[in-house]
Image (cartoon, rainbow, N blue to C red):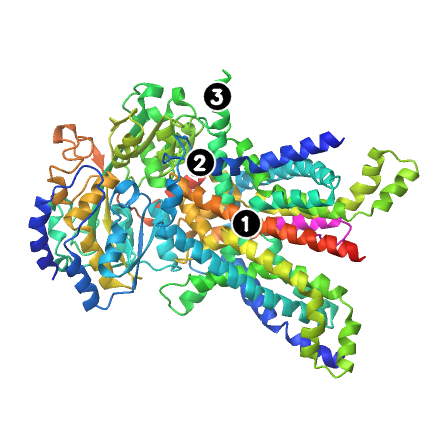
Amino acid sequence: MKTLSRVYVALILIFLYAPVAVMVLFSFNSGGSVWVFEGFSLDWYKGLATNTAMLEALKHTLIIAVLSALISTVMGTAASVGILALRKRVSRSAVMSITNIPMMNADIVTGISLMLLFVFIGNMFALKESLGFFTVLAAHITFNLPYVILSVMPRLRATDMSLHEAALDLGCTPVKSFFKVVLPSISTSIFTGAIMAFTLSLDDFVISYFTCGHYQTLPIVIYNMTKKTVAPDVYALSTIIFLCVFVLLILYNTLQSKADSRRGFNV
Amino acid sequence: MFKKILCITLGVMLTISLCGCGYEHFDINLESEYTEFAKEKGLVGTELNVYNWGEYISDGSEGCMDVNREFERLTGIKVNYTTFESNETMYSQLKNGGVSYDIVIPSDYMIARLISEDMLSKIDTSSLSNYKYIDKKYKGLFFDKKEQYTVPYNVGMVGIIYNSALIGEPQHSWNALWDEKYRNMSLNFNNPRDGFMTAQKLLGYSVNSTNKDEWNAACEKMKQGKDVLQSYVMDEIYGKLETGEAAIGPYYAGDYLVMLDVNPDLRFFYPKEGTNIFIDSVCIPKCVKNYDAALAYINFLLEPDIALANAEYIGYASPHTAVVNNPDYCYYQNEILYPKDEDMPDVEYYHDLPEDVRMHYENLWLDLKLY
Amino acid sequence: MNKKSFGSRLVAAPYIVWSAIFIVVPLIIMVYFAFTNDAGSFTLSNFAQIGKFKKAFGLSILYAVIATIITLLLSYPMAYYMTKFKIGHQRMIMMLIMLPMWMNFLIRTYSWITILANTGLINKFLSFLGIGPLQLINTPGAVILGMVYDFIPYMILPIYTAMSKIDNSLLEAASDLGSDSWSRIRRVIMPLSLPGVISGITMVFVPSVSTFYISQKLGGNKTLLIGDAIEYLFNTGPQYYNVASTLSLILMVLILISTLIMNKFGDDEEVVI
């Protein structure tokens, strides 16, 4: 049983990492192809430094991911507080159903409907250009919001409101009580929501494809590159990103297990 | 003002011999002229949105010149360069109004359509000092008779590329793409106009037929051949033919020459039934936001050594006299790009067709893909 | 409380305005496009054209169903076996599953071409063994493989989350009452992990049925899935926006129905994320 489970898990992981391994391998190719491995070289990594199109796209991706994660986290947390305070069950479930739409819907439908909206607004104001930075940002905020809300709201609901009420009774203003009492107890889920939003935004291709205009993010540039012959430089960039995430995750993991073991001793 | 640059540079240019296909360093004498123009018009720091075919400009890879970079360096104008893979995609982007472009480089029939829908801005060619380099036979063609909207960029013809090491020598006919022998080894175009052209020529129809039955027949022919094909491709054909993943497929002659550098087993022919000839031209769309910079860019593309770098990188036939007549041009008198009159295949341009025919073939293409 | 809650209700206002503008209005515009023609007058003719897309819809659903089933069959044992590892190792495996998701899926999908191509790694290996080249790329199998590969983490993670929440004492009680390991799985683990399975199925099915990149790269561009058809129409010109909106609308309704059906199976339990 034990060996079987290990072998199985290993097989699935091999399946998950096979294309990643191919990507890493070919990023060191001395030839210009991602089909034939000619020899080892670091040329594609060196070339990245001067590849302005790709670096710019990376910059765009990061800007959009950070901004959309921040805005959607703030707005989503506020929304969670507000939605829970809605008195009528009907209005609460109406808001929640709408919140679920971008999460349940296919990306292509979300992307197209947003594009139709932006172009419609653009035509209304006779703009020469209706898609760009603001539209892709708005789109990303829109699809991030449900994930933030669904991460924050359950935690908020489970939070003991008596502490909050006690604070109010002791003369705290509601705002102050929120920041001093409620927020600390839901901070983990806010953080989780923010990380989820950041990740989703970073990886989004379909919705950006329909809404980004000239403000091309990395997935869009990569998509255009895979329409012709892909050079190993894309692989080199992906390998670097992969390593960064890998290091961050290891770091997070170690910190987490340390925290776990500390908690373990305390109990 | 561009005329001045011309006089200075022309002499210099002709004396500098440009080595082979691709050179390490590039020295421009136009520095002051373009720089001054940009300063004078207050263009420094502005952006220029260029929308071009994929693999269609010398981009700095493998030691060749990076044309957009050079332009940025000289003028201080930032070039946002994006690419499309078919005229139809370009049209859709332009028409929808989501994105604005300052330069687009579509083909002849699409230009005619853009003009008829009032989507292009006029270009005063007399303000372009380098316009005179354009070969007369490519000026004032059917899609822009009065030379008001376009500046020719490249000329090309469609032919069939095959891997002689894998399949020997096929018959010189479009029929090769239907041949059962090459099952799963053959490719065809992934856009309606070029795709249907292969069937229309085989069936002996005009590519500009307004007879819907002929289009239907062409579509039927394509459906018959669909099972044999490996896939419908555009620029993916590079990787597929270079590595031997596929063995035969139609594409633009210039691209063959580029692929040949990578895989010497590749061969090329123009099918005996005749083929398509096209001209891709530089245009300024109506949604232009930086008109002066667009004009400077067009003139820059026509600078003899820029045009040469592009012609050598792209591999298409050039309408630029200073390139074609330059003995150091690596495709100088190349028999595929510039066939002699007696070797010239039977060619036909695409024309813009009436809307109902256009919608008909666009829907047929969808039928074919859905089939 | 009522007095106090007024203030906090107000903080949802920006979100409610935002979702009205960016979720509700776009869908209304899409519905408007679906029921009008190029000139903007009401018509049902877009729906009359849908027959043409029968095959695309059929294939999309078929491929997505197959991909979802395969993903489920692969993921369920995976999630089960994961819970058998030490907690520290479990977290490590979780991390390894999530790690590729931070890399662009376009690139990961593209890498499969290098593996599956006629001149690719598998076929090179086979020809080394003297076995003729197999047609792997440009087949329905390759498209389904791409779907399974890209979306399998969305299946493993919710199932694993549901399973790891199962109280160990329940299992112990079951063994004390004399059930063997198989009936423990069937009677205890399966029902309790169902919510995870339900949300996993939705999270794999929805992106699979609407994809347009995977089929283009791994399927050879020969057959259109519904996502490809929508993308083609949008890229051919605004005159096709109406039909494309109609297709999107139908796709949305299809997804809505399948989500509702799945949630019925889940006994109205809240979907696990």
Please report, as a chain letter, where disc 1 is located: A
Give the crowd class for mark 1: few <14, some 14-19, many >=20 residues within 10 Å: some
Q: Quadrant of the N terminus of chain C?
A: bottom right
Label 1 and label 2: CA atoms lie apart by: 20 Å
Residue position marked by numbered label 3 in the rendering: C133
Residue appearing at x 44%, y 54% in the figure: A58
x%, y% of residue B357? Answer: 34, 45
Q: Are marks 1 and 3 in contact (CB under 8 Å)?
A: no
Between discs 1 and 2, the one toward the N terminus: 2
Q: Can the viewer see residue C114 in this picture?
A: yes
Give the amino acid type for the residue marked by disc 2 in the picture.
Phe
Residue appearing at x 45%, y 61% in the figure: C40
Span highlighted in magenta in the image: C255-273
Report the mark closest to the observer, 1 or 3: 1
Give the amino acid type for the residue marked by disc 1 in the picture.
Val
Give the crowd class for mark 3: few <14, some 14-19, many >=20 residues within 10 Å: some
Give the amino acid type for the residue marked by disc 3 in the picture.
Pro
Please report, as a chain letter, where disc 3 is located: C
Q: Quadrant of residue A1?
A: top right
Residue appearing at x 54%, y 64% in the figure: C22
Residue position marked by numbered label 1 in the rendering: A245
Residue position marked by numbered label 2 in the rendering: A26
Please report, as a chain letter, where disc 2 is located: A
Q: Nearer the viewer, residue B240 or A105?
A: B240
Residue appearing at x 68%, y 46% in the figure: C91
- Tell me, yes or no, whether dots 1 and 2 are on the same chain: yes
Give the crowd class for mark 2: few <14, some 14-19, many >=20 residues within 10 Å: many
x%, y% of residue A254? Answer: 65, 50
